[in-house]
Amino acid sequence: MMSKTEALDEYFELTPKGVVTDKWSKARVFVMSSRGWSKMMAEIRAVFSNEASLILGRMGYSYGRELGKAIKKTGKDPIEAFGEVVQIARLAGWGKMTLLTGDPFGSSASVSFEDCVFCAGVVEDGTSSCEFVTGVLTGAFEETTGNDYGALEKFCHAKGDAFCQFNLERKS
Ligand SMILES: [Zn+2]
Ligand SMILES: [Zn+2]
């Protein structure tokens, strides 16, 4: 088993100038606090109310398209690449992503997210709050496969569920 430092070194390169690179995608990355993130999300919800879900979903979707491009650039088999994304997401503090059912790029899939960072600071109010993650998964699946997907968050930690879970269905 790798030590924490060895695992981080495998995927991230730090330079003295404050440039951190994700070795896998060769892209620059940065660390964001989940408290800051939850305040930003609360601000978007306060300002845009009904439109906030759409905005957050589209933000995630754009992020997911970029992630999908990185997956394609590795030239790896998408299933193998999906496994690496799971590993990187865990090391980057996103939480523990698990493929529950389905083929990640097949006609349907469910993905769980334990200790999801995107709703870590959210006050439970009975509603799902990880539209950003729903968007990331949709964008990544669409970019990687070239098909259209519909996605919904079935369970959400912010709703009082044990973890967040996303169900994806291929539309075309
Ligand atoms: Zn979540
Ligand atoms: Zn959630």
Image: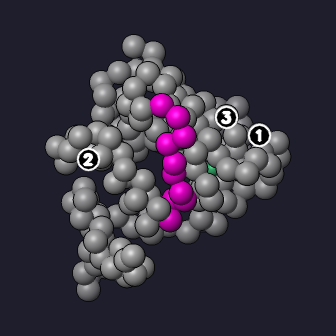
* Residue projecting furthest to the front: 1
Q: What residue type is disc 1 on?
A: Thr
* Camera-side mark, 3 or 2: 3
The segment highlighted magenta reads 93-102
Q: Is residue 127 above or below residue 113?
A: above
170 lies left or right of 26: right
Q: Quadrant of the C terminus?
A: top left
Residue 143 vs 2, above or below: the answer is above
Q: Position of residue 7 (x, y in %)?
A: 35, 74
Task: State how far apart marks 3 and 2 are (Cα).
Answer: 27 Å
Q: Tag 3: residue type?
A: Lys
Residue 29 percent across, percent down from the top left? 34, 64
Q: Can residue 132 be seen here? A: no
Mark nearer the N terminus (3 vs 1) = 1
Q: In which quadrant is the N terminus drawn?
A: bottom left
Helix, strand or loop at label 1? It is: loop
> What x and y, as percent, mark residue 62?
40, 39
SS state under label 3: strand
Is 75 placed left or right of 118 in the picture? Answer: left
The mark nearer the N terminus, 3 or 2, is 2
The residue sitting at 50% across, 65% down in the picture is 93
Cα separation between marks 3 and 1: 11 Å
The colour style of the image is one colour
Apparent side of residue 16 relative to residue 59 in the rendered image (left or right): left
Question: On the image, which quarter does residue 6 sit in?
Answer: bottom left
- Seen from the viewer's position, the closer of residues 81 and 101 is 101
Q: Is residue 42 above or below residue 56?
A: below
The residue carrying mark 3 is: 154
Q: Is residue 19 magenta?
A: no
Residue under label 1, please give it: 127
The disc labelled 2 sits on which kind of residue?
Answer: Ala
* Residue on which disc 2 sits: 70
